[in-house]
Image (tube, helix red, strand yellow):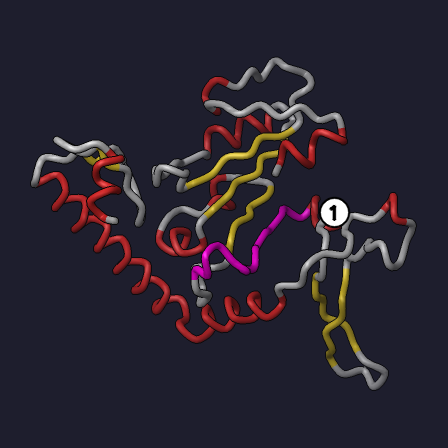
Amino acid sequence: MAKTRAEPLKIKVFVGDPNLIDWGDSSLCGILVQTPDAMGMLHDFTTLFEKAKQHGVVSCCGADLMASVLLKPPGEMGADVVLGSAQRFGAPLGFGGPHAAFFAVKEEFKRLIPGRVMGISKDLTGCPATRMALQTREQRIKRERATSNICTSQAFLANVAAFYAIYHGSEGLKEIASEMLSKAKILSVGLESVGHTVVNGAFFDTITVNLKGITPEEYVTCCV
C-alpha cells in the first residue's frame, strides 16, 4: 500500500532491516516499522526513533492495541506517528474486515491528520458541545490542498472499539491481554516439549515455529 501511494508522488520506498538504515542519506524522510512484526517478534524501537529524530526523519510505528496494554507503547518509545487496526477491541475477524483503524500523532503533526477528528466547543447557549475540528477536507477547500478525501466510513466499528475499551476498563483489558500472553506461552512450551523450535525470542500472542520431522506443506495437508 505504501509503495502504491508513494509511486505517483515520486517517493522511493525501501524495504529492509531498520538496523541497516543509511542515516547519511539526505533523501531519507521517514521510517515505518512494526511491533509485534509479521513473525510475532516484539521490538523496542526507542534507540531507532531517537536516531531518526536526530536526523530529522519522521518515525511511524504500526502497533497492536492489545499488546500495547501490557507492553511499552510506541508513543513512549518516541514514535511520531502510531497506527494500526482496532479489530482487537470487540470486532470479529470477519475474513479480514471491515475493521476500524486507529492512529495518533505528536502535537506538531495534528493539523495534518486526515478525517473526522472531534473537538470540544460550545453551542449557541454556551453549553459544552462536540464538533468536527482540525479539518482541511476536500469538501471545504480546494481538492489539491486537502489532507483527506472521501473514503469508507468505519464509524460504527470505531465506536465498537471505544465502547469495548470503556466497558472493560484498564484493568479488564490487562486481564484479557495477560490471558492471551499466558496461552501463547503455554503453546510455546508445549511445542518445544515435543521437539519443535519456537523462533521468537520475545512475543505477545503470535509465535513462529520451525517444525521438526514435518514440512509446513505436509502440516497443512494434515490439517485439511
Residue at horizontal 63 percent and vertical 67 percent from the top = 155
From this view, report whether residue 76 is shown above or below residue 44.
Answer: below
Q: Residue furthest bottom?
A: 125
Asked whether residue 24 is drawn in magenta, I would say no
Q: Residue 210 location in percent, x, y?
A: 22, 32
Residue ranking furthest to the right:
142
Secondary structure category for the residue under label 1: helix
- Tell me the magenta residue range: 93-107
Tell me what residue is drawn at x 68 percent, y 16 percent: 26
Name the foreground residue: 167 vs 7. 7
Res. 121 image quadrant: bottom right
* Residue 73 in the figure: left or right of residue 30: left
Q: Which residue is mark 1?
A: 112
Q: Residue at x 40, y 38 (%)?
A: 38
Q: Residue at x 63, y 32 (%)?
A: 3
- Give the left or right position of residue 44, taking residue 122 as reference: left
Q: Amino acid at mark 1?
A: Leu
The answer to whether any part of residue 84 appears in the image is yes
User: Can residue 201 be spotted in the picture?
Assistant: no
Q: Position of residue 14 (x, y in %)?
A: 58, 23
